[in-house]
Amino acid sequence: MRVLAAPDKFRGTLSAREAAAAIALGAKRAGWDAVELPLADGGEGTLDVLGGTNRTTVVTGPLGEPVEASWRLEDGVALIEAARACGLTLAGGADGNDPLRATSRGVGELIAAALAAGAERVVVAVGGVASTDGGVGAVAALGGHPVVPVEVACDVDACFLDAANVFAPQKGATPEQVAVLRDRLARLDVPDQPGDGAAGGLAGGLAALGAALVPGFDLVAAELDFDRHLAEADLVITGEGLVDATSLTGKVVGGVLARAAATGVGSLVIAGDVVTNAPVDAVSLLALCGRERALAEPAACLAEVVEKELTARARTA
C-alpha cells in the first residue's frame, strides 16, 4: 500500500517539506510505502516546493525598509514569492504592521529585476503579504506593462474589495482602517472579479497590467505532476496548520481532496488544529498530542498520529 504525503505547510511549526517527511515517516512505521510531495497554493512556501531560490535582490520592504528578497530564475522562468518582499512576517506580524502604509512596491521591484535578468516568463506567488494597496506599489515600481507573460498564482479566490473587508483585519487593520483601505481600493481602476483580492489586491493590480490570474494550487500541482503521483497512490494524506472555512477556497487541502475524490483515491487530513464545524473531517494534532507537545514537537507528533491512523485502518480493512 502506498501513501502520497502531500501537505501544505503547518504555519508557524512545519514547512511543507518537513510535514511531508513526518507523514512519510509515520506511514513507513505503519508498514506503508510513502512518496513525499510537499505542496503549496500560491502563498508562502510556494518557492520552496518548486525548487527553492538561486537569486537574491535588495528591494523595498513592506514598511519601506530595504530587505533581501530571494527568488528563482531557471530556464527563462522567474519564480517570485510576494511574501519574500512584502510579507506580513517582515512587518512584524499583525501587531507590528502599519496597514495604511504597507506597500507591495518590493514585488514590482523583483519583477523588474527578473525582466532585467532575461526572464521570458514570470510567475508571482501571492499570499501572506502585509499590504492592502491593491498592487499600487508594485505597479509604480514596474513603471509600465511587463514585456513578457506574467502569471499570478492566487491562494484565494476573493474579489478585489474583499482584500480590505476580509483580509485587512488579519494584517492588523482596525475597523476604521479597513474603511480607509476599502475606499482606496474602490477608487482604483481594477475589475472586482474572483482572484483580484489575493495578496491585498496585488493580484488585481498586476491583472490590470495584463497578468493572468491562475489558481495557485493548480499551478503547483501541474509543476509537480501531482495527478500522476495521486494515481499511483492508495491513500493521500494532506494537511495544514489550521483547518477552517477557508480550507476549501483555493487552499491545498481543498485541492487535494477534490482531486482525490474525482479519482477515487482515499484521503486523510491532519492539521495542527481544527475549528468547530470545520468543512472537512480532519484529525487535530492539538487534540491528540496536547497543545504544549504539538507546538514543541510538531514533526514527532505528526509522525505518531499518521502511524496510529494507518495502523487502525489496517486493522479494520
Image (cartoon, grey):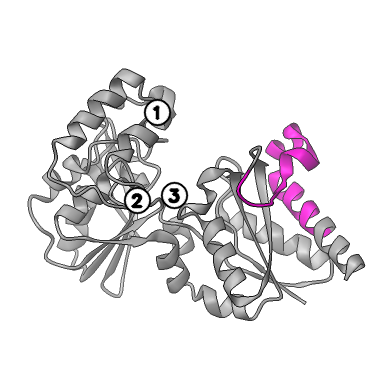
Q: Is residue 101 visible from the viewing direction of this image? A: no
| 93 vs 257: above or below | above
Against 79, residue 56 (above or below) is: above
* Discs 1/2, front: 1
Q: Is residue 148 left or right of residue 277?
A: left
Q: Earlier in the sequence, mark 1 or mark 2?
A: 2
Q: Residue at the spot x=16%, y=68% of the render?
A: 148
Q: Which residue is mark 1?
A: 169
Magenta region, mostly helix, strand or loop?
helix
Could you tell me residue 174's position as x and y percent? 36, 20
Foreground pick, 88 / 204: 204
Given this view, does label 3 or label 1 mark the residue nearer the observer? 1
Tag 2 residue: 126
Amino acid type, callout 1: Pro
Residue 244 in the magenta stretch? The answer is: no
Question: Magenta span covers which residues?
Answer: 278-307
Q: CA distance from mark 3 to mark 2?
A: 8 Å
294 in the magenta segment: yes
Q: Along the horizontal axis of the image, is 220 left or right of 150?
A: right
Q: Is residue 252 left or right of residue 127?
A: right
Does label 3 or label 2 sit earlier along the sequence?
Answer: 3
Where in the figure is residue 253, as x and y percent of width and height?
56, 56
Q: State the CA–CA distance, disc 3 to disc 1.
A: 19 Å
Say which label, 3 or 1, has the lower sequence index.
3
Tell me, yes or no, whether the two marked residues, 3 and 2, touch with CB atoms within 8 Å.
no
Please identify the residue farthest to the right as the structure is shown. 315
Tell me the element at label 3. loop
Amino acid found under the numbered disc labelled 3: Glu
**Residue carrying label 3:** 44
